[in-house]
Image (spheres, grey):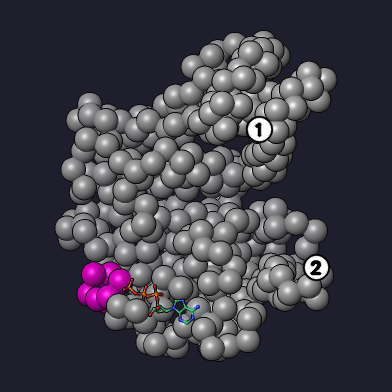
Amino acid sequence: MTQKTFIQRLKLTDFRNYTQAGLVLDGRHVVLVGKNGAGKTNFMEAISLLSPGRGLRRAVLSDMPRIGATDSFTIFAAVEGMNGEADIGTGTETTEDGNLVRRLRINGSPAKSVDDLTDHLRILWLTPAMDGLFTGPSAERRRFLDRLVLSLDPAHGRRANDFERAMRSRNRLLSEGRFDPSWLSGIEQQMAALGVAMAAARREMLGLLAGLIEADRQTSPFPSAELSLTGFLDELGELPAFELEERYIEVLAQSRHRDAAAGRTLEGPHRADLTVRHIEKNMDAERCSTGEQKALLIGLILAHARLVATMTGFAPILLLDEIAAHLDEGRRAALFDRIDALGGQAFMTGTDVAMFSALGDRAQIVTVEDGSLDV
Ligand SMILES: Nc1ncnc2c1ncn2[C@@H]1O[C@H](COP(=O)(O)OP(=O)(O)OP(=O)(O)O)[C@@H](O)[C@H]1O
């Protein structure tokens, strides 16, 4: 039995187009309705900042404070989270040397790391900006994949950051022509251990997700996705981890001159790609129609939300920006039923409240107008 996590209260100060806005919620789903430019996505972005990372727009911090305000914003949320009730506050602050930095307080005390947020909430999202995921650059798919892993395994983010840092040191040494074997092999060993662990975490998550998608195929109103990874470490994925590490260490050692010439590391988890196929059509997702791609993506997010609920025992919070826009009435109703069956709190946006009529009293309607919120 999964438990519910939800946001009870939210207060925004000088965030994007909100000067001061607050909401008290009752745990049902939340539908945000308003005209274009009213502040619906900004609201969703604020909630996404209650999870580690740069939020659903991947914006830089300096874009977030309200234009015309001082340079800081705050987001405060009272939540019923995975550890019971918690108060989470995040925002920006300018340090003495003039840098804008993110601040995070949990239950009144400064948090040690943004990863602490995952002790309280798991937040997943789907936005129109993700519509081109299957046809766009592989970096976007990797980021998507890593977010999926991160919501199950919070240590994944740290491993990926440490890998990046080690890789940058190696790239720097190579670009400066410093082919010192003991320095380089120390860094390469670290890269191999982290890289193999990253690939394993991705593979494990995809395996679990594939199992859920398969079990759900007959009843899901959305197409089923077959997911696979391509990349040097993924193609050798069946090897035991220590052997995989040895192979990667060997490849890195042998490719120092090639990497120096290329100005980057050519093999590793940072080059992996996620391939998605539409199972029923037996077609690569990138060759499916726009509507089919959207339906695949919705099915994928819902399956992942179920996976997070199963693995953690808590239904995640879902941020679904403009989710209903391109679906016909029947699919929309089926989507709402699926979202509701997850047992969590979902935030959805739209310009027309009529689109959400099938939700009935399962949702609270919030009107958004020029940076103000009204339940
Ligand atoms: N830092 C900022 N300060 C003030 N206003 C901002 C800031 N960043 C963005 N905005 C403005 O916030 C407004 C609302 O944007 P938002 O993306 O939330 O709209 P929306 O309601 O989702 O609209 P749509 O239905 O068109 O997607 C926009 O007019 C945007 O220019």
Q: Residue at point 52% right, 20% down?
A: 232
Q: Residue at point 60% right, 56% down?
A: 53
Q: Residue at point 56% right, 26% down?
A: 261
Task: Provide residue 139's location: percent of width, then percent of height.
Answer: 46, 41
Which residue is situated farthest in the front direction here?
177
Helix, strand or loop at mark 1: helix
The magenta-colored residue range is 350-357
Q: For the residue carrying disc 1, how many other residues have a C-alpha within 10 Å: few (<14), some (14-19), or many (20+)?
A: some
> Which part of the image, by quadrant, shows the C terminus?
bottom left
Q: Indicate which label's residue lies in the foreground, 1 or 2.
A: 1
Residue 363 is inside the magenta segment:
no
Q: Residue at point 71% right, 70% down?
A: 99
| Of the pair 230 and 206, the residue shown nearer to us | 230
Which amino acid does the dot numbered 2 rest on?
Pro
| Of the pair 124 and 340, the residue shown nearer to us | 124
Helix, strand or loop at mark 2: strand
Label 1, label 2: how far apart the Cα atoms are: 39 Å
In the rendered view, tell whether residue 62 sits above or below residue 225: below
Exactly how many numbered labels are in the figure?
2
Task: Provide residue 330's location: percent of width, then percent of height.
Answer: 18, 56
- Number of the label disc, if any, that sits on residue 339: none
- Number of the label disc, if any, that sits on residue 110: 2
